[in-house]
Amino acid sequence: MKALVINCTLKRSPQPSNTYALAKVVADQLAAYGVDIDCVRAVDLDIKPGVTSDEGAGDAWPEIHEKLLSSEILIVASPTWLGRPSSIAQRVLERMAAMMSETDDRGRPVAYNRVAGVVVTGNEDGAHHVISEISGALADLGYTIPGQAWTYWHLGPGAGPDYLDDERGHDWSHTTGRAMAANLYGVAQALATTPLNAPPG
């Protein structure tokens, strides 16, 4: 089984990413179950604007699209900015919109029988809003969203320190992240055993 983590931080490599640091807790738990993990930092790539799977010369999205199609588990990780997902997360979701019209050889939407979850960090409130926006978009595409398939970290309303700068709240975020991984893995196993069929015509 494979999992893809798309880190939607605004920080380019090699800058430390708070979002990746928390997403790695989830990824490490999935790896403990034997899942093969691949991580992409979207901001490092030239992902063109658009809503197709290939926007032409220089577009980095087709490679990510292939990773999505080879992964049973997807984790979208985003910081909170002004109470909303990052602009990079929005770009990723817009490009994933093409999957709504793509089907496999059995007529099923390509996101069917795949599971997805969300990781959020930020030194401001708004994590539940970000989780709802991203989870809703992924469900629209056809991903299955298990119960409690998210974790987040922040220290309450207003500005504050970053995840990597403050240990407060880490225990809860990590425990929730490991539960997220268990739920993603369990539902992915269930779908592999009893997959969804193509929707009725």
Image (cartoon, rainbow, N blue to C red):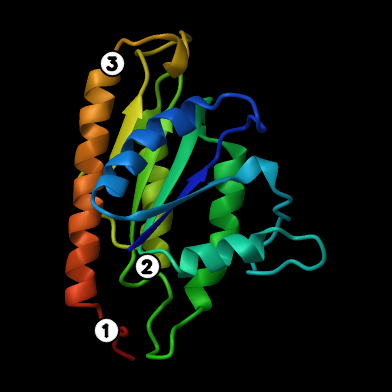
Residue shown at the point (48%, 72%) measured from the top left: 100
Q: Residues within 10 Å of mark 3 (few under 14, many from 20)?
A: few
Provide residue 36's location: percent of width, then percent of height. 38, 56
Q: Position of residue 146 (x, y in %)?
A: 22, 54
> As rendered, which of 19 and 90 lies closer to the eye?
19
Q: Is residue 111 left or right of residue 179?
A: right
First of labels 3, 1 by sequence position: 3
Q: In the displayed structure, does residue 144 sit left or right of residue 98? A: left
- Describe the element under mark 3 as helix, strand or loop: loop
* Disc 1 + disc 2, Cβ < 8 Å: no
Q: Name the foreground residue: 164 vs 101.
A: 164
User: Which of the pair 32/63 is nearer the observer?
Assistant: 32
| Quadrant of the drawing holding the N terminus | bottom left
Which residue is painted at 40% across and 69% down in the image?
A: 111
The residue under label 1 is 197
**Residue 105 figure quarter:** bottom left
Sequence-first disc among 2 and 3: 2
Residue tagged by mark 3? Answer: 169
- The image quarter in which residue 150 lies: top left
Q: Which residue is mark 2?
A: 142
Q: Residue at x 22, y 23 (%)?
A: 172
Q: Amino acid at mark 3?
A: Gly
Q: Is residue 168 visible?
A: yes
Look at discs 3 and 1 and give the one toward the viewer.
Answer: 3
Whether residues under marks 3 and 1 lie with C-beta atoms below 8 angstroms apart, the answer is no
Marks 2/3: CA distance? 32 Å
Asked which secondary structure carries label 1, the reply is loop
Above-or-below relation of 43 to 170 = below
